[in-house]
Amino acid sequence: MEESQVLVVFPHPDDEAFGVSGTLAKFIDSGVPVTYACLTLGQMGRNLGNPPFATRESLPHIREQELEAAAAAIGITDLRKMGYRDKTLEFEKTSDLANMVGALIDELKPSLIISFYPGYSVHPDHEATAAAVVEAVRRLPASERPKLHLVAFSNDTFEDLGEPDITVDIDGYSDRKQRVLEAHASQTGPMLASLAADTQEAEAAANMWFKIERFYSYHIGD
């Protein structure tokens, strides 16, 4: 994991928890600085806890606290809250969002950016974030572009993408990733309950989430 600086750009609290928190913890334990830019506070999240413990009015504050707790569990000390409102990123100009990402790149000079894969991240805020990250990197001279390791998921198939070409073994980080997921209690309760069930399905899901994290490398022009 020979990186000089990792920049993580996701739109919502908990986006980091599911697919990349083990990888980020591993980077941090290897001495690689990690900056997490979270664009919103997930103010419009559908879940209010299970059983509910948040209200529409309290959810933004709760999710901010959850984000801070999750970052601490990972080991992230450079958490940036970028101040956008949940479910509005799709209405921002891509060029404006790319300017914001570009400013982070100029400041941090990351060797690697982790975000979502454009066209394969389902949620409009995810797609807007992915497009902005790619645009910000596209603007750079080819020799100055950081690597892009992107998370893809979709309601459809991945036939045209194929299998992820980057896998990170996070064996030994399952307890830490569990704590990250638990930090986002307003959103992850049902998932964690299903993972704790004594079934073959739960065991298979736990192996999927807690053993390996998968990414696609993205090259400008893809």
Image (tube, rainbow, N blue to C red):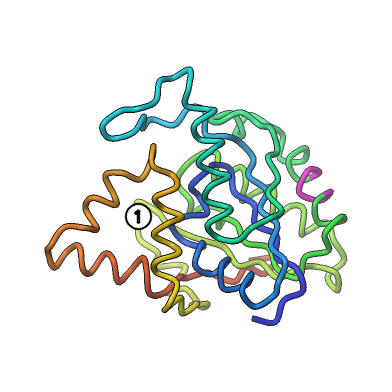
Judged left or right of residue 8, residue 13 is left
Residue 186 lies in the magenta-colored region: no
Judged left or right of residue 202, residue 3 is right
Residue 102 lies in the magenta-colored region: yes
* Nearer-the-camera pick, 126 or 42: 42
Name the residue located 80 percent from the left edge and 67 percent from the top edge: 145
> Residue 113 placed where, x, y %?
68, 63
Q: Is residue 107 above or below residue 112?
A: above
> Residue 166 placed where, x, y %?
52, 77
User: Helix, strand or loop at disc 1?
Assistant: loop
The quadrant of the rendering that contains the N terminus is: bottom right
> Residue 156 placed where, x, y %?
35, 55
Residue lying farthest left?
199
> Type of residue at label 1?
Asp
Q: Report which residue position mark 1 lands on.
A: 156
- Report crowding for label 1: few under 14, some 14 to 19, many 20 or more residues within 10 A (C-alpha): few
Name the residue located 47 percent from the left edge and 71 percent from the top edge: 214
Q: Is residue 159 above or below residue 38?
A: below
Residue lying farthest top?
57
Q: Which residues are magenta?
A: 99-103
Name the residue located 39 percent from the left edge and 69 percent from the top edge: 174
* Nearer-the-camera pick, 72 or 158: 72
> Residue 168 placed where, x, y %?
50, 77
Q: Is residue 159 above or below residue 93?
A: below
Name the residue located 36 percent from the left edge and 65 percent from the top edge: 209
Q: Of helix, strand and loop, which mostly describes the magenta segment?
A: helix
